[in-house]
Amino acid sequence: MSANAKVIEMTNMVSEDGQGLMYEENLLWEKERSDHPGVDLPEPEGAALRIGVEARDADIGLPQVSEPQALRHFVKMSTWNYSIDHGFFPLGSCTMKHNPRLNEKLARLPGFAHIHPLQPASTVQGAFKVMHELQHWLAELTGLPGVCLSPAAGAHGELAGMMTIKRAHEHKGDTSRKIILAPDSSHGTNPATAVMCGFEVRAIPTKLDGRVTVDSFKEALYATCDKGSDIAGMMVTNPNTCGLFERDIVELADLLHKAGGYFYCDGANFNALVGKVRPGDFGVDVMHINLHKTFSTPHGGGGPGSGPICCTEELAQFMPVPTVIEEGGEFRLETEEDRPKTLGRLKGFHGQFGMHVRALAYMMSHGADGLKQVSEDAVLNANYILSQLKNDYHVPYEGPCMHECLITDKHQKEAGVTTLDLAKALCEHGYHPMTVYFPLVIPGTMLIEPTETESKDSIDRFISVMKGFAADVKAGDTEKFHGFPQSTPRRRLDEVKAARNPVLRWS
């Protein structure tokens, strides 16, 4: 029995993860029973067509199935959407963490779930108070007093933050600042957002230690002007996408501010700092916060997301409206008349209110000490995985990590097994793979984020499977990795053929 076979046997004995999901489900058209439709109504006679177009000549094309068939079909498919409720979800830089059911219960209270954004302010005072309270605690946790809850996702928050910076420069008449500095390890949305706002992006190389050094920052800052007067700002994630804290961040912020630029912090990894460090204290001017990553609101499926921004007092006058303000014990939404320098309204209505309820519930159920422990446990879990796998996989950066750890396939690739092979092998073992081939600064990366919500037992099972892979590769048992997964509903694709000759229509 191979080393990995023993791991599989042990894992299946003690784990709920087991093998890949075994469901298979035909398309609804393949179930069709023309004599057994879900609805059986007589053909209407003498009814005028009221949709403004000619009547169909052919059938509508929908499958004719019964109600139970339709229900079972979609319920079965819903179980294929792997989620944090199915098992361990180690996506680095995405933070797939448990959503406490308490949060869900509170978001479904009638006074929250059954209101409408166009109701009179007097009828939604409780909802406004929730938003006002959330604004307060986000300001406290970040050290940035201006808070706007409008953005509907992290990337939308980035857009709001960069639009705020642009508005500030325009108000000062400083329109010659066109350059945004961003590390080469940035989330892809950073340079995309900067370009959308009309800026040019200058990359800062992170070089050998995965961090922005003072020397590389100065080189980028003064590349075209010895005073940096063409620099509008920088976009830096801290901790960064290599899972490392930017040690020189205070000095970098000071250099940027001296040159007249603003520090936008991508707050995607704030879950590693919450309750421990306030970004405003290391020089951040504006940042977004992914409520799903740091404060446990639902993530994925296209929304609803929420990416509030937090700003310094200087920038708060330029950020989008509305925020919730309190006057004489009453709450209301501010307008552009309240804050005439604002860049205006970012979206319809006032943000994803259900996410605001969930995030505030999470904060209040944890308290200050609990939020501090959240970040401590996230960092502890990631470092535990790193310590257990560092002798089996290549670790590109020395020292401890923050809330996510980075390994590569360097050792396994020498034997013909790549990061993609390892990811597919995890699928075979019933695990969702970690983030692969990101960040792009080194080849074959695997970015693992266990989050604070995983138990040691759960993490140990994942570690044992990863160690088993490394042992099999070392023993020369490599060919099987090119065929994984075998027990999932869909096998491994010929990705080159799929890209060159995609089949886009069922027939």
Image: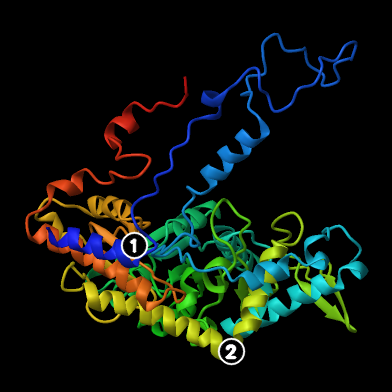
Please tell me which residue lies in front, 36 or 209: 36
The reply, left or right, for residue 457 in relation to residue 102 is: left
The quarter holding residue 497 reads: top left
Query: Is residue 143 at least partly visible in the picture?
Result: no
Q: Amino acid at mark 1?
A: Asp
Which residue is most to the top?
A: 57
Residue 395 percent coordinates (x, y): 21, 70
Give the tally of numbered discs.
2
Q: Quadrant of residue 228?
A: bottom left
Where is the N terminus found, in terms of image quarters?
bottom left
- Residue 256, position in %: x, y? 45, 76
The residue sitting at the front extreme is: 13
Around disc 2, counting alpha carbons within 10 Å, would you say few (fewer than 14), some (14 to 19), or many (20 or more)?
Answer: some
Q: Residue at x 56, y 38 (%)?
A: 73
Mark 1–mark 2 distance (CA, rounded to whole Å): 34 Å
Q: Nearer the viewer, residue 217 or 466?
A: 466
**Residue 368 visible in this rendered orientation of the protein:** yes
Residue 486 position (above or below residue 287): above
For mark 1, what is the residue? Answer: 184
Residue 462 falls left or right of residue 270: left
Q: For mark 1, does the 10 Å Cα neighbourhood hold few (<14), some (14 to 19), or many (20 or more) residues?
A: many
Q: Which residue is mark 2?
A: 368
**Tag shown at residue 156:** none
| SS of the residue under disc 2 | helix
Image point (25%, 46%), residue name? 484
Q: Residue at x 45, y 61 (%)?
A: 179
Residue 505, image x and y in percent? Answer: 47, 24
